Amino acid sequence: MKYLRLIFRNVVRNRRRTILTVLSITMSLFLISTLKTLLDELENPPATIRF
């Protein structure tokens, strides 16, 4: 439990760095999943197109 307290102290010590780190990780995961989905759809288009 002492490690958890130490981690929490360091996280709240510099809020700007924490927010930027979380935003960076979130944005990178979003871009990776979006690009992967786009590539999958371009490689395997639907069999029929319905209008």
Image (cartoon, rainbow, N blue to C red):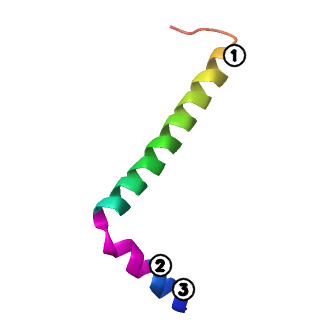
Q: Are marks 3 and 1 in contact (CB under 8 Å)?
A: no
Give the mark, 1 or 2, whose residue is nearer the N terminus: 2
What residue sits 39% from the left and 81% below the top? 9
SS assignment at label 1? helix
Which span of residues is magenta-colored? 8-15
Q: Badge 2: how crowded within 10 Å, few (<14), some, or many (20+)?
A: few
16 left or right of 43? left
What residue sits 53% from the left and 92% below the top? 2
Q: Quadrant of residue 38?
A: top right
Q: Badge 1: how crowded within 10 Å, few (<14), some, or many (20+)?
A: few
The front one of 33 and 19 is 19
What residue sits 46% from the left and 87% below the top? 5
Residue at the bottom extreme, as displayed: 2
Q: Are marks 3 and 2 in contact (CB under 8 Å)?
A: yes
Number of numbered labels in the structure image = 3
Give the number of the mark in front: 3 or 1: 3
If the image is split into quadrants, where does the N terminus sit? bottom right
User: Residue under circle 2?
Assistant: 7
| Residue 45 visible | no
Which amino acid lies under the numbered mark 1 shown in the image of this protein? Answer: Glu
Give the number of the mark in front: 1 or 2: 2
Magenta stretch: residue 32 in it?
no
- Does residue 43 lie above or below 7 as drawn? above
How far from the left and from the top, in percent, is residue 25?
Answer: 48, 50
User: Residue under circle 3?
Assistant: 3
What residue sits 44% from the left and 43% below the top? 27
- Does residue 33 lie above or below 14 as drawn? above
Which amino acid lies under the numbered mark 2 shown in the image of this protein? Answer: Ile
Mark 3–mark 1 Cα distance, whole angstroms, equals: 46 Å
SS assignment at label 2? helix
Q: Quadrant of residue 32?
A: top right
| Residue 43 badge | 1
